[in-house]
Every structure is written in structure tokens, then in C-alpha cells.
Image: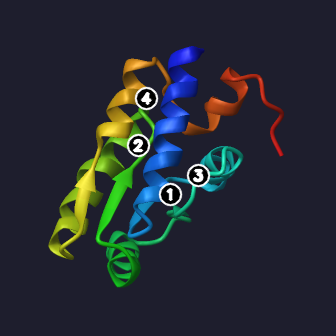
Amino acid sequence: MHRLKAYISDLKQFSLRNPDWAILVEGKRDLKALKMFGIENVVEMKGRKYHDIAECLSESYVGVVLLMDFDPEGEAILRKLTKVLETYGLKIDTSFRDRLKSLGIRFVEEIPLLLRLPRR
């Protein structure tokens, strides 16, 4: 629990100190989960095509923190999207995703439940 709270605090501080970085998540529930903690610059994929996402992000951000889930779909998205984002000149950060994995969390939307916060 303490490590998860530290993770959220670090991600929030990163988002506040780096407004030119987006935090990309797969869907609406992931977006809501992070927004509950005051994390800024969270963008959801909304089922958009990878090149459309990359083009949109490259207009406003220099880098992207990728927070895809750890299911087969999330892993596939991560691999494909990383390549596309790099072709648009965006920097990629997966360290926050790696930390989630080390905490045993498979889905971003689980975070509020694990911290026993009500979903909104």
C-alpha cells in the first residue's frame, strides 16, 4: 500500500513538473483512475488509430509516458505504439509502467480499488 501511494505521488509530481509530457492510457476508466489523484496531462487512446494519436500528441507534447495494461492487448498496443510515437519524434517513458508491474498491478483502473478509494 505504501509503495503504491509513493508511486502515485511520484507520477503526480512528474505530471506537474513536466507539462510537456502526456501520460497515455488505454481507456476512460484508466483516465478516471489517474485523474482521481490529481494527475495532469492524462490522455486516453479512445480506440483511435496509432498514427492519429501520435500526430495529436506531437502537436502538444515532447514526450509520452506509456501506461498500457499488462494483458495481451496492452502489451501489443505498447509494442506498436512505441514505434509509431518515435517516428513522430516523441520521447517515450515506460519507467512508470515498469514500476506498476513491480507492484503486481496489471490494470491502471485497479489503482483506486487497491487504495480503497471509491470510483467516481
Label 2, label 4: how many angstroms apart (C-alpha)? 13 Å
Mark 1, Cα crowd under 10 Å, few <14 / some 14-19 / many 20+, is some
Would residue 81 be found to the left or right of residue 30 on screen?
left
Does 17 sit above or below residue 87? above
Q: Image point 32% across, 31% down: which residue?
A: 98
Alpha carbon separation for disc pair 4 and 1: 19 Å
Residue 106, how many percent across, how many down?
48, 27
What residue does disc 2 label? 74
Q: Which label belongs to residue 100?
A: 4
Mark 1 or mark 4, which is nearer the start of the sequence? 1
Kind of residue indicated by mark 2 = Gly
In the rendered view of the protein, which quadrant contains the N terminus?
top right
- As measured in the structure, the alpha-carbon distance from the residue carrying label 2 to the one carrying label 1 is 26 Å
Residue underneath mark 3: 39
Verify CB contact (< 8 Å) between mark 4 and mark 1.
Answer: no
First in sequence, mark 1 or 3: give its number: 1
Q: Which mark identifies residue 41? A: none
Identify the residue at image location x=37%, y=37%: 97
Q: Are marks 2 and 1 in contact (CB under 8 Å)?
A: no
Against 91, residue 114 (above or below) is: above
Q: Nearer the viewer, mark 4 or mark 1?
A: 1
**Counting other residues with Cα less than 10 Å from the Cα at mark 2, is it few (<14), some (14-19), or many (20 or more)?**
some
